[in-house]
Image: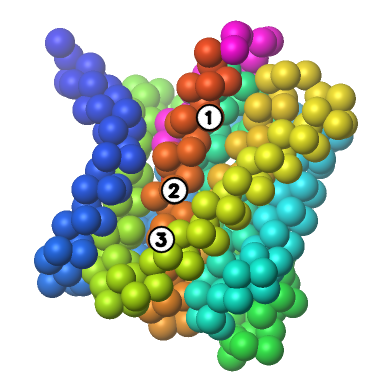
Amino acid sequence: MSALDYLETIASYANKFFVVWVVLLAALALYAPAYFTPISPYITPLLGLIMLGMGLTLLPEDFRRIVERPRDVGIGAVTQWLVMPLAAYALTIVLGLPSELALGVVLVGAAPGGTASNVMTYLGKGDVALSVSITTVTTLTAPILMPAWVLALAGQSVDVTFVSLFTSIVQVVFIPVLAGFALRYLLDRYAPRAAEVGLTVFPTISVAAIVAIVAAVVAGNKGVILGAAAAAIAAVVLHNGIGLTAGNLVGRASGMSEDRVRAVTFEVGLQNSGLAVALATAHFGGGLVALAPALFSVWHNVTGPGLASFFSSRGDPTSGERAAPESAD
């Protein structure tokens, strides 16, 4: 077995048992937080590393595809940008959440799609090309739309400017994604073997980074989590369920094929909760604000694989044009 085969085996196990690692490390962080709190200062760089990995999965044809098939991409992106922020705001009112926890829920709702949706679309035999295109659009528009939603829905309770949020998202998301895309282009052209190795290694790096982020948030907020877990869990479960249901219904109502319906389902329901965690930590002091994003990271990596298995068991509709994506968020 070659070194690349070993790397592929490790990456396969890392992705296959991703939920196990998240839950296990979160539990350990609650039991022994002192071992994980030193990670907290590195949450933002870790997220940048994850987004670099996402950029590595992008190809020039992904951007061409957005132009060639704008209708379904637009439907998915608009649904994601409308349903999740508004659902978050409604849940904070209906559940009567305290202001800091409510802000965390809004941050999750205002986040763009993450690469988890691409992976789950692949596993669920959906249209991966459409999924990647929607994720690309929501990610590249996040510097404008995310701070706009956060300030619109929680402006009275936050002391953060649009410019500061915009700057953070550009630094943590936009620049790493474009850097990853450029690196992939150069490697494919001049060092294809290195590109193959990179795409094999990065899934494991991404999994490790996400697990580290969740563990750091849990460790730094042990008391808050134990005291407010019930309300936060209810908000996260309902939020994720609303997103998945809305994505599925909108896809069907707009006449999409089954594989595209599956892609939109995951795109709307699965958020880039890692970005929400990073912003909660960088701009809002972490604490209760970071709780909902951290829990969402765990929960959507439970419902996502479950729904993907259900879709897969129903048959294999005409799938997308691309192979499996390489990393999850």
- Residue stretch rendered in magenta on the structure: 314-327
Tag shown at residue 307: 1
Which label belongs to residue 294? 3
Q: Position of residue 258 (x, y in %)?
A: 72, 19
Eyeballing the image, is 59 above or below 101? above
User: Callout 2, which amino acid?
Assistant: Trp
Q: Is residue 316 magenta?
A: yes
Residue 149 vs residue 245, the one in the foreground: 245
* Front in this rendered view, residue 93 or 221: 93
Q: Quadrant of residue 146?
A: bottom right
Q: Position of residue 24 (x, y in %)?
A: 22, 48
Check whether the beta carbons of the residues at disc 3 and disc 1 lie within 8 A of each other.
Answer: no
Magenta-drawn stretch, dominant element (helix, strand or loop): loop
Question: Compared to 96, does 212 lie above or below?
Answer: above
The residue depicted at 35 percent of the width and 51 percent of the height is 210
Image side of residue 130 versus residue 226, left or right = right
Q: Position of residue 17 (x, y in %)?
A: 28, 33
Tell me if mark 3 has few (under 14), some (14-19) or many (20+) residues whose alpha carbon lies within 10 angstroms of its own: many
216 to 250, vertically: above or below: below
Q: Amino acid at mark 3?
A: Ala
Q: Which residue is mark 2?
A: 299
Residue 294 vs residue 191, the one in the foreground: 294
Give left or right: position of 81 versus 38.
right
- Residue at x-position 20% and y-position 62%: 29
Question: With 188 as the anchor, is 318 left or right in this view?
Answer: right
Q: CA distance from mark 3 to mark 2?
A: 9 Å
Quadrant of residue 312 in the image?
A: top right
User: Disc 1 marks which amino acid?
Assistant: Leu
